[in-house]
């Protein structure tokens, strides 16, 4: 038999329960947003606990899951410990709803103070709810205490959200202390997460110290993460010192990474100082490096200076690349 639907005798909840019945009858959840906001915002603070108790009796409803989170977020802002106790008391039979509730409390409580929220989340029994609570605290910590967030991440089991936390916290730390961020990323187990996190740190480091960033990037294993980091560093470096960035790119072995890096430098340099970029090109000896750089330079001048672009194209030694550039210019 279905569970009876209790009618609240609390006058503070009459409007809430009436709105529930009306909204619960709407079959399209996409239309619930305004109604849910109104239900939560119009509820007196002293009735939040009663409203959550009522919603708890309807835990099998998707609307109940949404309202539980919204009500708990508001209650936590007022009485974090009371809201936390209520969330922790939810039955483990509804672990998904309990995990959502714990995460909602942890997120808002951590905004008020990391220490109390973290102490509470750590004391929860092992399971999905505890993990979600710790993740919520850690993400909030990453905004002002990224080292604390990284310490928490190392305590958590592997998951997509943990990987997202590590990358986010490392990026936040890299904005103020990239050297420390690189050290933290280096403590991760070898694998894609470590490589991608180090690559992100290197790219951010390039804004303040492109040489150190470049050194870090070249320590990464060859692959997509390193390629992305190098190109990002070159692009940032070219904004500050394009000649130095170009000289660094020239040191790469022949291949896609070198070509992409040179192209990035030349396009940015030509946009910034067309003449200086052209003079640098004239210092390069004939060969594949020069051909790639000239082709990138041409893409920046062909619209405004087609005759000059044609002259540059004629200096390309690679006949296939030269023919492609001729055809492109003629088409334009």
Image: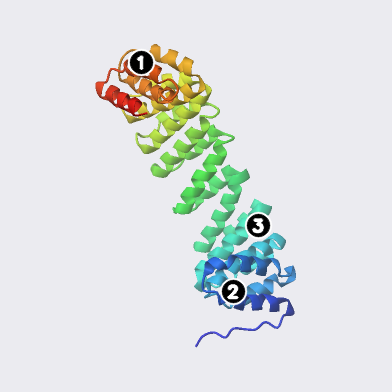
Label 1's element?
A: helix
Numbered badge on residue 199: none
| 174 shown above or below 211 | below
Which residue has dot 3 on it?
109
Numbered badge on residue 23: 2
Instruction: Report whether 134 appears left or right of 252.
Output: right
Q: Give how far apart the Cα atoms at labels 1 and 3 are.
A: 66 Å
| 300 shown above or below 51 | above
- Most extreme residue toward the left, as rendered? 319
Task: Find residue 132 and report its horizontal and vertical position in percent.
Answer: 53, 59
The residue carrying pointer 1 sits among few (fewer than 14), some (14 to 19) or many (20 or more) residues within 10 Å by Cα, namely few
| 163 shown above or below 16 | above
Instruction: Report whether 125 appears left or right of 279.
Output: right
Mark 1 or mark 3: whose residue is earlier in sequence: 3
Q: Nearer the viewer, mark 3 or mark 2?
A: 2
Q: Quadrant of the C terminus?
A: top left
Which residue has dot 1 on it?
311
């Amino acid at each position: 038999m279905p569970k009876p639907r209790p009618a609240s005798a609390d006058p503070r909840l009459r409007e809430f329960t009436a709105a529930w019945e009306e909204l619960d009858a709407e079959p399209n959840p996409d239309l619930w947003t305004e109604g849910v906001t109104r239900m939560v915002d119009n509820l007196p603070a002293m009735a939040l606990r009663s409203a959550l108790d009522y919603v708890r009796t309807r835990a099998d409803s998707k609307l109940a899951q949404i309202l539980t989170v919204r009500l708990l977020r508001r209650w936590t802002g007022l009485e974090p410990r009371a809201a936390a106790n209520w969330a922790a008391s939810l039955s483990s039979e509804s672990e998904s709803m309990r995990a959502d509730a714990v995460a909602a409390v942890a997120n808002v409580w951590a905004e008020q103070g990391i220490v109390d929220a973290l102490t509470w989340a750590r004391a929860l029994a092992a399971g999905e709810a505890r993990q979600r609570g710790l993740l919520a605290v850690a993400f909030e910590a990453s905004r002002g205490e990224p080292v604390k967030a990284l310490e928490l991440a190392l305590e958590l089991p592997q998951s997509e959200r943990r990987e997202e936390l590590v990358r986010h916290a490392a990026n936040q730390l890299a904005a103020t202390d990239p050297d420390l961020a690189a050290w933290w990323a280096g403590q991760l187990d070898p694998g894609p997460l470590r490589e991608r996190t180090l690559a992100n740190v290197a790219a951010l480091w390039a804004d303040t110290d492109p040489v150190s960033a470049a050194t870090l990037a070249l320590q990464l294993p060859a692959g997509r993460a390193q390629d992305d980091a190098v190109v990002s560093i070159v692009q940032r470096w070219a904004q500050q010192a394009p000649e130095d960035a170009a000289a660094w790119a020239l040191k790469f072995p022949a291949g896609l990474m070198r070509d992409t890096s040179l192209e990035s430098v030349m396009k940015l340099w030509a946009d910034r100082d067309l003449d200086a970029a052209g003079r640098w090109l004239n210092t390069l000896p004939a060969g594949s490096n020069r051909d790639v750089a000239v082709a990138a330079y041409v893409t920046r001048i062909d619209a405004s200076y087609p005759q000059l672009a044609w002259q540059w194209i004629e200096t390309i030694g690679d006949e296939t690349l030269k023919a492609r550039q001729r055809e492109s210019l003629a088409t334009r």
